[in-house]
Amino acid sequence: MRVEIQVGDRTVSGTLNDSASSRDLLAQLPLTITMADHGSVEKTGPLPVELTTEGSPSGADPNPGDIGYYAPGNDFVLYYGDQSYFPGIVILGSMDETGPDIVGAIDGSVTVTVTRSD
């Protein structure tokens, strides 16, 4: 399941996994989210509707470039740095190889639009 992520004036391609959480995200697209830096490793922003975590592990150790969901905060997450294992993280997929650099190069808040891609 392919998505396009418009980050400021740049576009990043992404691939979502075939999980219940990812399918819930797809059902909400297109989405525009205001995202902010968190811990100098990720951009996070609230989703309008919670995603299911059914069938997901209780946490994850995301890699730079991963697309995630932080269930306790109902946040969509783009990882650009190395985040260690943390409870409540669900990996939804990954960005293309340019994603972490593009996302990480933006200081402060940014408006992100996520749409389906064919």
Image: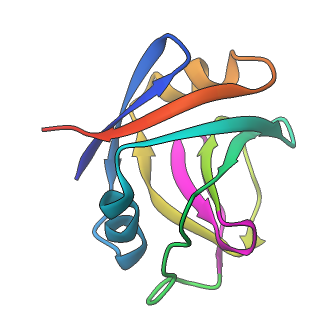
Q: Is residue 65 magenta?
A: yes
- Depth check: 4 or 28 in front? 28
- Quadrant of the image containing the C terminus: top left
Q: Is residue 54 above or below residue 38?
A: below
Give x and y (percent) for residue 40: 84, 35
Residue placed farthest to the left in the image?
118
Residue at image point 69% right, 37% down: 35
Which image quarter: residue 78? top right
Residue 3, horizontal then vertical, whole percent: 30, 41
Residue at point 32%, 58% (across, down): 26
* Magenta stretch in the rendered image: 59-74
Identity of the residue drawn at 35% across and 50% down: 29
Question: Which residue appears at 36% of the width and 78% of the height?
Answer: 20
Q: Position of residue 105 (x, y in %)?
A: 69, 15
Give the image's coloring scheme.
rainbow
- Can you name the residue that lies furthest to the bottom here? 55
